[in-house]
């Protein structure tokens, strides 16, 4: 369980802890929380309240009382996390309304499904140096996003051919990149030849989208 649910300020933490402990005390029997655990948390909460009052009082506020307050808070927080993990976090009897009443986060029980890509990558070819082809890609339906939601990266199928291919199956080589651009480096003997390629998206589950149109570029 994340510790983000614990209030940062001392005053809010004190109020939250009192509310939490009261709720746990009322549910102790139902949730099988030993009374000794409730009493220990109650004692630590009271210790923190007293230390906080002393540390905030101008007449008693010193480095020593501030440190005592910090130590008391640390002890109360540590016990709270331990108790919640042992008796609340994985307890099926604890409902979402219970968690809301205690000021605890409500976690999703199901994952949001990752959609299969339905758009195609839009490619821009750049020739930064001899024998190097850079293929910059972005989502064809977005002017700003390089990849659609849930997409892991782009697959490029390519081949060096003497005549334009009539089917994607003729693009027998494959590369993959998670970030644009996708960079291909060729041999010197391949300069001046025609590179044909097409791209498609692949999501985080390995599902692939449709191929783009086949594009060509002359290897510089």
Image: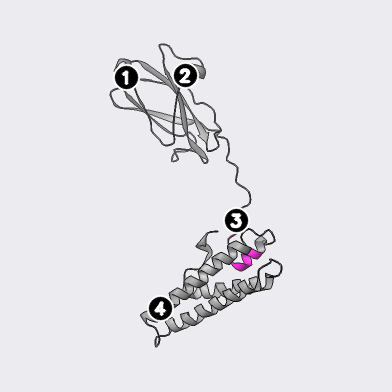
For the point 67% across and 70% down, the residue is 28
Q: Position of residue 135 (x, y in %)?
A: 39, 29
Seen as rendered, the residue at the extreme top is 162
For the point 47% across and 19% down, the residue is 172
Q: Which residue is mark 4?
A: 66
Q: Which residue is mark 3?
A: 107
Q: How is the image coloured?
A: one colour
Q: Which residue is mark 2?
A: 172
Cα separation, mark 4 vs mark 2, equals 70 Å
Cα separation, mark 2 vs mark 1, equals 18 Å
Q: Which residue is mark 1?
A: 187
Quadrant occupied by the N terminus? bottom right
Direction from residue 105 to residue 51 in the image, left or right: left
Q: Magenta residues, as a range? A: 98-106
> Element type at marker 2?
loop
Q: Position of residue 22 (x, y in %)?
A: 63, 74
- Image position of 116 with respect to 104: above or below: above
> Element type at marker 1?
loop
Cα separation, mark 4 vs mark 1, equals 69 Å
Check if mark 2's residue and mark 1's residue have beta carbons within 8 Å. no
**Quarter of the figure with residue 21:** bottom right
């Amino acid at each position: 369980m994340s510790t983000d649910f614990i209030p940062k300020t001392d005053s809010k933490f004190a109020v939250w802890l009192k509310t939490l402990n009261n709720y746990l005390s009322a549910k102790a029997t139902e949730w099988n929380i030993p009374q000794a655990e409730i009493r220990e948390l109650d004692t630590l909460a009271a210790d923190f309240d007293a230390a906080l009052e002393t540390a905030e009082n101008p007449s008693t506020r010193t480095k020593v009382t501030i440190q005592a307050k910090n130590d008391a808070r640390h002890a109360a927080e540590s016990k709270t996390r331990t108790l919640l993990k042992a008796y609340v976090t994985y307890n099926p009897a604890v409902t979402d309304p219970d968690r809301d009443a205690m000021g605890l986060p409500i976690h999703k029980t199901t994952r949001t499904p990752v959609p299969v890509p339905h758009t195609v990558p839009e490619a821009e070819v750049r020739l930064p140096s001899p024998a190097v082809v850079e293929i910059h890609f972005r989502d064809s339906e977005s002017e700003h996003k390089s990849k659609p939601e849930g997409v892991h990266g782009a697959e490029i199928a390519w081949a060096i051919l003497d005549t334009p291919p009539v089917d994607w199956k003729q693009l027998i080589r494959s590369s993959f990149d998670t970030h644009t651009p996708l960079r291909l480096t060729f041999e010197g003997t391949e300069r001046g030849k025609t590179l044909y390629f097409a791209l498609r998206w692949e999501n985080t589950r390995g599902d692939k989208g449709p191929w783009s149109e086949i594009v060509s570029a002359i290897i510089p």
